[in-house]
Image: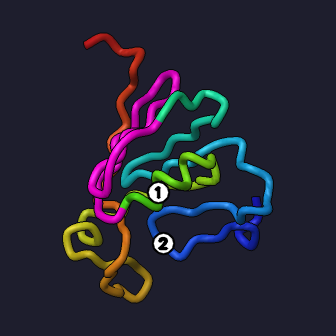
Amino acid sequence: MPVSELVSTIPDWQTVKPDEQRPECLFVQLRRGAFVFPWFRFVYASGESAKIVIVFATHQLTVTGRGLGALLTAIAGQRLVRLIEPSESEASLGVRMPGAVKQDGPMIDSIAVKDLSEKQ
């Protein structure tokens, strides 16, 4: 999907425009690695402003931050294309590169991915 088709004013996640086709998958960019989850494997999401849990058939994502209500709305409409976990420095200082601008709005602090098929 070309970047020109993405719309988001929040640097930690990207969504498609409301009039565009829903994305087929969610790309999760972590500090050390990445995952791609097909939306047809989406089970549910729940949460509040500081923590959201997103469950796919085989994995659970836990997103922490602030102002995450807009993220939950994007998930509900399956308009979310990408989640981006900021570096540890960005998260602790509340800034995002480039330009190291202090963020006042919604932001992600961390994303944890748990494999549900692994035995506890």
Query: Under tag 1, what secondary structure?
Result: helix
Image quadrant in which the C terminus is located = top left
Give the image location of residue 22, x and y in percent: 73, 49
Residue ID for mark 2: 10
Identify the residue shown where x is 49% and y is 46%: 34
Left or right of residue 91: residue 115: right
Kindly report which numbered mark, 1 or 2, lies closer to the viewer in this rendering: 1
Give the image location of residue 69, x and y in percent: 40, 58
Give the image location of residue 84, x and y in percent: 45, 59
In this picture, is 96 found above or below 111?
below
Q: Which residues are magenta?
A: 45-67
Under mark 2, the amino acid is: Ile
The Cα–Cα distance between marks 1 and 2, rounded to whole angstroms, is 9 Å
Count the marks.
2
Magenta highlight: main SS: strand
Query: Under tag 2, what secondary structure?
Result: loop
Left or right of residue 6: residue 44: left
Is residue 61 found inside the magenta-colored segment of the image?
yes
Q: Residues within 10 Å of mark 1 (few under 14, many from 20)?
A: many
Q: Nearer the viewer, residue 96 or 14?
A: 14
